[in-house]
Every structure is written in C-alpha cells, then in structure tokens.
C-alpha cells in the first residue's frame, strides 16, 4: 500500500461545524466523523484546537448579520445625504457669489428728497 501524496485540507468553517456537530447532545463524535468521512482522531484534534481557540468559526463569505446589515444601510443613507448636502452647498456658494457681484455693481445716488438706485452696466 502506497502513501498518500496529496492530503485533504479543510477550512476552519468546516472544522468548526464538525466540532459543533460532535458537541450536540446525544451525538457521538465517531458517528460525525464517519458521516463527514474523516478519521475520528482528526475530529478529536479539531475539538482540542477549537477549545484552544486555534479554530474560529468564520461566517460564510457574503453573509451579514442583521446588525451589520442595518449599520450598512444607515451608512449608505448618510453617504447619500452627504452627497446631496455637498450639491446644495455648491449651489448656495454659486448663488451667494452672484449676489455679491450684483451688490458690487449696485450704486446709491442720494438726492435731497429721495434715494435713487441705479445699476452700472456690466
């Protein structure tokens, strides 16, 4: 019998799931190992690593918890509001600049009886 040249490798999520299945009440680790087609000693080693913190159950890629989803939704709303406020700010700057130019061109002539306003030609 020849030795294996390529060994199976399992990610931490798979290992954590296997350990959690083995920790269920009434479930034997040997049965879990048999179902997952791994050696029982490997499952026991994973249990030790899980207890020591070497194996951490990671979430599946692309899944978010409800708190993270709500935070992401709130962040997107804030970014949208910020963008809208920047546009409004730019419009107000342009409007105030044009009012300043008009005020600069406005001259006041005083008569003795009343004030007459005229605008210089541009």
Image (cartoon, rainbow, N blue to C red):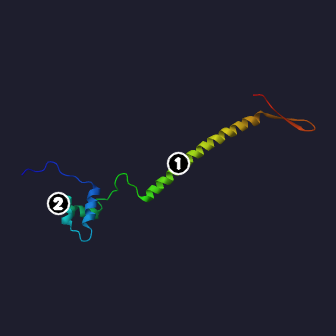
Image quadrant in which the C terminus is located: top right
Q: Is residue 79 above or below residue 38?
A: above
> Quick check: 82 left or right of 60?
right
Total count of labels: 2
For the point 35% across and 52% down, which residue is it?
A: 61
The part of the image, by quadrant, that contains residue 23 is bottom left
Which residue does the numbered mark 2 point to in the structure image? Answer: 39
Residue extending furthest right?
113
How far across and down, in percent of the image, does residue 106 sit?
Answer: 79, 34
Q: Residues within 10 Å of mark 1 (few under 14, many from 20)?
A: few
In space, the residues marked 1 and 2 are separated at their CA atoms by 51 Å
Which residue does the numbered mark 1 point to in the structure image? Answer: 79
Q: Is residue 122 above or below residue 68?
A: above
- The local secondary structure at tag 1 comes to helix
How far across and down, in percent of the image, does residue 66 sit?
Answer: 43, 59
Residue extending furthest left?
1
Which dot marks residue 20?
Answer: none
> Quick check: 73 left or right of 34?
right
How far across and down, in percent of the image, does residue 90 sit?
Answer: 62, 41
Say if mark 1 contacts mark 2, CB within 8 Å: no
Residue extending furthest top?
121
Instruction: Give the mark nearer the N terminus: 1 vs 2.
Output: 2
Report the front residue among 60 and 57.
Answer: 60
For the point 26% across and 58% down, which residue is it?
A: 15
Q: Residues within 10 Å of mark 2 (few under 14, many from 20)?
A: few
The part of the image, by quadrant, that contains residue 92 is top right
How far across and down, in percent of the image, does residue 56 sit?
Answer: 31, 59
């Amino acid at each position: 019998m020849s030795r294996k040249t390529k060994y199976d490798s399992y990610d931490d999520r798979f290992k954590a799931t296997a350990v959690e299945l083995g920790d269920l009440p009434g479930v034997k680790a040997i049965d879990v190992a048999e179902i997952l087609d791994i050696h029982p000693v490997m499952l026991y080693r994973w249990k030790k690593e899980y207890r020591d913190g070497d194996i951490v159950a990671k979430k599946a890629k692309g899944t978010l918890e409800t708190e993270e989803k709500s935070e992401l939704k709130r962040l997107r709303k804030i970014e949208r509001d910020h963008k809208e406020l920047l546009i409004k700010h730019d419009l107000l700057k342009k409007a105030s600049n044009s009012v300043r130019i008009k005020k600069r061109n406005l001259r006041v002539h005083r008569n003795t009886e009343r004030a007459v306003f005229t605008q210089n030609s541009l």
